[in-house]
Amino acid sequence: MSSPPRTLKIGLVGFGNFAQFLAKTMLKHGHTLTATSRTDYSDLCLQLGILFFRIPVSFLEANNDVIVFCTSILSLSDVIKAMPLNVLKKPTLFVDVLSVNQHPRDLLLQELPEDSDVLCTHPMFGPESGKNGWKDLAFVFDRVRIQNEALCSSFLQIFAGEGCRMVEMSCEEHDELAAQSQFLAHTIGRILAETRTESTSINTRGFETLLHLKENTLRDSFDLYKGLFMHNKFAARELEKLEVALQKVKQKLLEGTNEEPNIGLANH
Amino acid sequence: MSSPPRTLKIGLVGFGNFAQFLAKTMLKHGHTLTATSRTDYSDLCLQLGILFFRIPVSFLEANNDVIVFCTSILSLSDVIKAMPLNVLKKPTLFVDVLSVNQHPRDLLLQELPEDSDVLCTHPMFGPESGKNGWKDLAFVFDRVRIQNEALCSSFLQIFAGEGCRMVEMSCEEHDELAAQSQFLAHTIGRILAETRTESTSINTRGFETLLHLKENTLRDSFDLYKGLFMHNKFAARELEKLEVALQKVKQKLLEGTNEEPNIGLANH
Ligand SMILES: NC(=O)c1ccc[n+]([C@@H]2O[C@H](COP(=O)([O-])OP(=O)(O)OC[C@H]3O[C@@H](n4cnc5c(N)ncnc54)[C@H](OP(=O)(O)O)[C@@H]3O)[C@@H](O)[C@H]2O)c1
Ligand SMILES: NC(=O)c1ccc[n+]([C@@H]2O[C@H](COP(=O)([O-])OP(=O)(O)OC[C@H]3O[C@@H](n4cnc5c(N)ncnc54)[C@H](OP(=O)(O)O)[C@@H]3O)[C@@H](O)[C@H]2O)c1
């Protein structure tokens, strides 16, 4: 096996919000980047020193060591299936950074050539929470199919080198924990947006944390949130738990009193 | 009208969690405290330099300038009605610190002698959020019936002097804003407790703020939360908005897709 390459040729598929955020740090580490996306990012890429390919074939022929899927969760399947993977010139490490893990794992194993490596990851931070560096922020990964260990380590070093807390776990375990934590937080943020929750002149500290949560949730696309739900098999259960919990809280508020609350519940 | 007394004789009715927290700062300001409560706090009061009366009559005869109701929202009515207010020796400033305002306002105006003053307040902080001082934390108040301005100012100075943001508003306005903010935050905290939300090994920042919210909410008694609901006429509407919002979010997650999410919703 070849010794670990110092600088990698990394291709990014999907050059939206999160890919742009990741690219800055990858460039800082001295890696050479190429990108392709639905939207034309030629100008932005030119500024950043990234080669942008409008056509997937040209992107795939660019001889990348690593190809990172940074598309929305919902579009990954279509994006992969539209790629003429037979033009690849060498065994490549395929990585995804989607906020769910089992779904890309299944897709990548199904669609990619057998000689390619597969690393499923989820950096548990984004442009907002990671704006002051990535130190101590969790980077979750699963070495799904790795033959070239050196290459995989070089790629992981981008995150380890930034001080991320490197958490290796199965895609399934990730999805279960992420549904209980991240999906739940996004759901509360979306609910608060739906109730049009706004700052008042008498915010408590607790309420202020909810306002921040709402604002941060809305920075992410609805596609991202929907992807968390549609492609994480544990998410629907968490949503249901939330519904049940709300009903239980309501019941506890009403139980044991014959009085109606001050206002009749029907009174509005 | 007499000049503002420098040090006040303040009597606390209800010497639970929040009264003990307030008492420390009142003592620091040099005021003389007495207390009465359902539970016997004689020993604790002795340590703190507070005179504790088991019997309401003796408490009322102690010639306080100010009497502060610090009981639970749910018990205020019974507590006031059980007090032999006719033994009061002089016009007194009655204050409440309940987390709702209209309910104590109505009760105090109804039950207290007409020559007594009434100040409804809500310090929008507690032992947790106020543990490092009260600077910039909101203190909401309504001078419901004040004849002795000097006495009222001296009392308010406890909070102003600590750097609280002094917010004067009607009891009704307070209740409306507090339902939209504090009650909502408590409700989310209670819901999270009900879903048994716990820390995972891969918490996002957003999720961590929810864990803190849950923990802080559970530090307050369920009586307090129930009081926020039962005696704030705007609270039921907020609870209903939350239910509707959850359904809307769910609907948006499911709409426009013929696919079921990855897991069948019935699948658990
Ligand atoms: N934002 C975060 O904090 C964060 C953190 C960790 C992981 N992630 C993951 O990173 C990925 C990207 O996230 P994001 O925040 O940039 O927003 P996103 O809305 O999840 O994804 C946007 C990206 O998906 C592409 N895309 C969307 N629909 C497409 C379609 N129908 N066909 C082809 N491409 C399509 C967009 O391409 P164009 O730009 O070319 O339109 C863009 O590159 C997601 O999988 C997300 O779960 C995000
Ligand atoms: N905790 C906070 O952060 C905070 C902040 C602002 C305002 N407040 C308000 O301050 C008041 C006190 O709050 P808290 O945190 O101490 O907890 P709480 O559970 O709301 O009230 C506890 C107090 O109520 C008394 N009490 C409860 N049931 C009673 C009954 N049936 N008969 C007589 N007394 C009864 C307790 O007396 P014993 O101790 O003698 O049993 C204790 O003094 C509440 O009105 C609350 O809304 C609290």
Image (spheres, coloured by chain):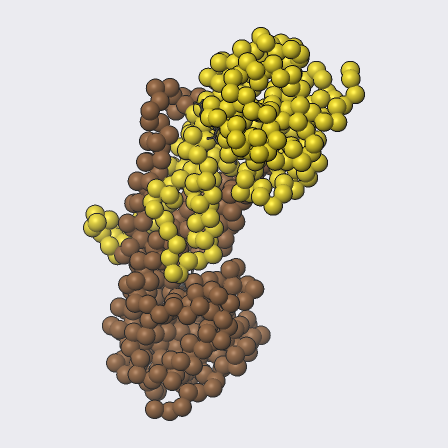
Chain colours: A yellow, B brown
Q: Whole-percent x and y of residue B140?
A: 38, 67
Question: Quadrant of the rendered structure where residue A202 is?
Answer: bottom left
Give percent across and percent down for residue A255: 32, 48
**Front residue (pair B175, A265):** B175
The image position of residue A95, as x and y in percent, is 60, 22
Height in image: A222 above or below B49? above
Q: Which residue lies most toward the left here? A: A267
Residue B152 on image: x %, y %: 38, 80
Q: Measuring 55% from the left and 21% from the top, which residue is drawn there?
A: A53
Nearer the observer, A195 or B29: A195
Q: Which image quarter has ligand 2?
A: bottom left
Q: Quadrant of the N terminus of chain B?
A: bottom left
Q: Residue at x 51, y 34 (%)?
A: A17
Q: Is residue A165 visible?
A: no
A200 above or below A186? below
- Up-down: is A186 above or below A38? below
Instruction: For the C terminus of chain B, give its image quadrant.
Output: top left
For this view, does B50 lie left or right of residue A7? left
A109 shown above or below A265: above
What's the residue at 48%, 14% (across, down)?
A: A82
Residue occupying the far bottom of the picture: B2
Note whether residue B91 is visible.
Answer: yes
Taking A168 as reference, is B20 left or right? left
- Horizontally, residue A221 falls left or right of residue B175, namely right
The front one of A142 and B64 is A142
Residue at the spot x=41%, y=51% of the render? Answer: B185
Question: How many marks do you count on the picture?
Answer: 0
